[in-house]
Image: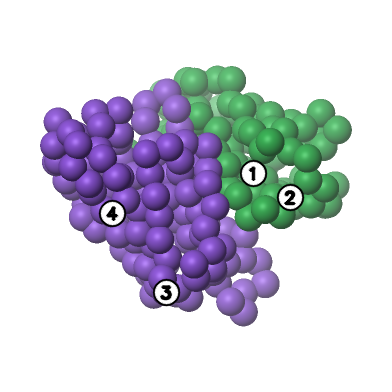
Amino acid sequence: DAGITQSPRHKVTETGTPVTLRCHQTENHRYMYWYRQDPGHGLRLIHYSYGVKDTDKGEVSDGYSVSRSKTEDFLLTLESATSSQTSVYFCAIRGQQGKELNTEAFFGQGTRLTVV
Amino acid sequence: AQTVTQSQPEMSVQEAETVTLSCTYDTSESDYYLFWYKQPPSRQMILVIRQEAYKQQNATENRFSVNFQKAAKSFSLKISDSQLGDAAMYFCASLGGSEKLVFGKGTKLTVNP
């Protein structure tokens, strides 16, 4: 267990409402990632963070924003949810300080989001 | 741009046989890492094998090995002596100096008894 928790695990929301997903880690990993997984599309990178307050866009960032105000938490916000954002969202962490081989990513259990 | 392409949406193999999953990638970086991850029905992502681009020797982990062709930007995964527990989605991924971790679309592997 790499000490990564996603919340909530399941959520149903209405179109047009804002939604925030949380990724929490207890392992002091520097890098954090948000992905969405959809059939036929694999894992697509939404945003990632390389430190506190340091974030960058992935390939499918439109309609999403992120924040990382402390090492442990990486928040993903859907500013105005749409049905096309119905998906399973995964958080990943990487780069534990002091580890030589810090390339391995550890994943949360996923959040199933349904936008109706 | 950093991209990963898996051209086989689905593959099947008989138990105890060998199967090879294909992956090609594109990157402008000189130093990078390549990975294969496994996702069983539980949805948990598990690292199978890792390859550092500057190492010419192909990585191996027990029954799993890769064929890394740097010039061709190809990174295939070979699973020997396939077992029922190998059935899963397999994702190829690349990590570059930008720290961006990019995945392919995945290959669903079925193992037939």
**In the rendered image, which residue does mark 2 sit on?**
B32
Q: Which x, y percent locates residue A52?
A: 50, 70
Q: Colour of chain B?
A: green
> Which amino acid, mark 4?
Leu
Distance between the Cα atoms at labels 2 and 1?
7 Å
Q: Disc 2, disc 3: CB below 8 Å? A: no
Determine the image quadrant of residue B39: top left
Above or below A87: residue A55 = below
Residue at the disc numbered 3: A70
Task: Determine whether label 3 and label 1 are within 8 Å by CB.
Answer: no
In the image, B60 versus B52, the foreground residue is B52
Badge 3 marks a residue whose secondary structure is strand
Q: Measure the C-alpha gap from mark 4 to mark 2.
A: 30 Å
Dot 2 and dot 1 residues touching (CB under 8 Å): yes
Q: Are marks 4 and 1 in contact (CB under 8 Å)?
A: no
Instruction: Depth check: give the residue in front, A54 or A22.
Output: A54
Label 2: state its secondary structure: strand
The kind of residue tagged 1 is Ser
Q: Give the Cα distance between marks 4 and 3.
A: 15 Å
* Residue depicted at 82% across the width and 48% down the height: B30
SS class, disc 4: strand
Query: What chain letter is assigned to the residue under label 1?
Result: B
Q: Number of numbered discs present? A: 4
- Number of residues whose C-alpha sits closer than 10 Å to that of mark 4, classed few (under 14), some (14–19) or many (20 or more): many
- Same subunit, labels 2 and 1: the answer reads yes
The percent position of residue B10, horizontal first and vertical second, equals 47, 20
**Image position, residue A46 (x, y; %):** 46, 43
Q: Which residue is mark 1?
A: B94
Which mark lies nearer to you, 4 or 2? 4
